[in-house]
Image (tube, grey):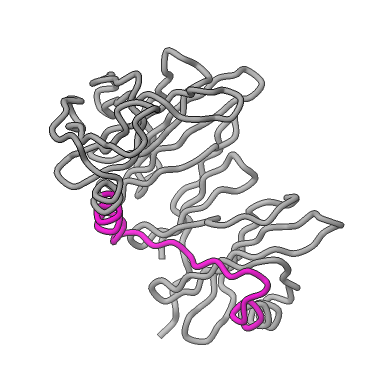
């Protein structure tokens, strides 16, 4: 049977760099943080991971000193900055996706994570580092207090494990790993590319997805995403993630259901269905 190659679902180029993406695997939504360093402007865009259709960008009252913590339950959880020199987070602002409106704010609380039952775990203040509270995600009301760090970590980890079951992230293999040698030889034999530094690897569906680096100059690399048939190792699709990077990163792509998503040249979000 002829293997169907991954098909491009969408490609969206933003006018400013993509700072980060937070997936909501259950709702199949992507929350994208866009940061324009020239205008000191931050925007948040929520789009459908299946179609690429995006809503109107959300701009907070504070244009620059704001960032995205997480997304779930069709909500965006934003943070401010306590110390702008070191980037320490403080404050929680929760915004509904549709309609776009602020549901609640806690100026002193520090976001820790999400938990089952529509809960947000947080430090009450920056001074209370070992005691946590649970907030209702939709109202901000305190529903539980005096939570220990161990308890907070356990419930956040458990919920993260549950909500990411519909998504998959690659395994990172540094150059020192024995698997790096095996994978780099595989890439060389199939694509002719000489891999250096690190490889991100994931097997999903009928395909192998590998993100790897080629040296283009001293301390400069080309980052490539290769899609290979799992059955015979044939290269079926290649995408250049970045033509010139100065460092080796991790997590350059992820899979949501049967869609692989990644960023090219810092400002374009691309999705392939497989």
Q: Residue at x 48, y 70 (%)?
A: 202
How far across and how far down the image is residue 104, in percent?
25, 20
Instruction: Indicate left or right for 72 with 53 as reference.
Output: left
- So how many labels did they put on this image? 0
Q: Which residue is drawn at 62% across and 83% down?
A: 182
Q: What stretch is highlighted in magenta?
A: 156-182
- In the picture shown, does residue 101 fall above or below 274? above
How far across and how far down the image is residue 243, in percent?
73, 52
Q: Does the magenta stretch include residue 64?
A: no
Q: Residue furthest right?
A: 218
Q: Which of 137 and 5 lies nearest the eye of the viewer?
A: 137
Instruction: Indicate left or right for 54 with 229 as reference.
Output: left
Instruction: Indicate left or right for 109 with 192 as reference.
Output: left
Q: Which of 230 and 151 lies nearest the eye of the viewer?
A: 151
The image quarter in which residue 120 lies:
top left
- In the picture shown, does residue 253 fall above or below 179? above
Q: Quadrant of the N terminus?
A: bottom left
- In the picture shown, does residue 162 fall above or below 96? below
Q: Which of 71 and 97 lies nearest the eye of the viewer?
A: 71
Q: Is residue 162 magenta?
A: yes
How far across and how far down the image is residue 47, in percent?
37, 38
- In the picture shown, does residue 229 fall above or below 13? below
């Amino acid at each position: 049977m002829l293997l169907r190659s991954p098909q491009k679902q969408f490609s969206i180029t933003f006018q400013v760099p993509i700072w980060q993406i937070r997936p909501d695997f259950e709702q199949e939504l992507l929350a994208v943080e866009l940061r324009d360093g020239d205008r000191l402007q931050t925007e948040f865009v929520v789009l459908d991971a299946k179609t690429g259709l995006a809503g109107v960008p959300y701009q907070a009252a504070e244009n620059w000193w704001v960032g995205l913590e997480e997304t779930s339950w069709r909500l965006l959880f934003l943070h401010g900055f306590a110390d702008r020199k070191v980037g320490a987070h403080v404050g929680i602002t929760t915004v509904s996706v549709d309609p776009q409106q602020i549901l609640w704010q806690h100026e002193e609380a520090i976001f820790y994570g999400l938990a089952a039952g529509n809960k947000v775990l947080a430090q009450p203040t920056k001074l209370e580092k070992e005691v946590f509270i649970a907030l209702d995600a939709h109202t901000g009301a305190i529903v539980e207090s005096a939570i220990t760090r161990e308890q907070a970590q356990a419930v956040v980890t458990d919920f993260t494990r549950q909500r990411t079951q519909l998504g998959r992230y690659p395994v990172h293999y540094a150059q020192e790993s024995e698997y790096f040698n095996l994978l780099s030889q595989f890439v060389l034999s199939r694509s002719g590319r000489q891999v250096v530094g690190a490889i991100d690897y994931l097997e999903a569906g009928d395909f192998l997805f590998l993100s790897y680096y080629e040296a283009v100059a001293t301390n400069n690399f080309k980052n490539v995403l290769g899609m290979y048939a799992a059955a015979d190792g044939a290269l079926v699709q290649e995408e250049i993630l970045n033509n010139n990077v100065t460092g080796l990163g991790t997590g350059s792509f992820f899979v949501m259901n049967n869609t692989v998503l990644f960023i090219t040249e810092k400002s374009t979000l691309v999705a392939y269905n497989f």
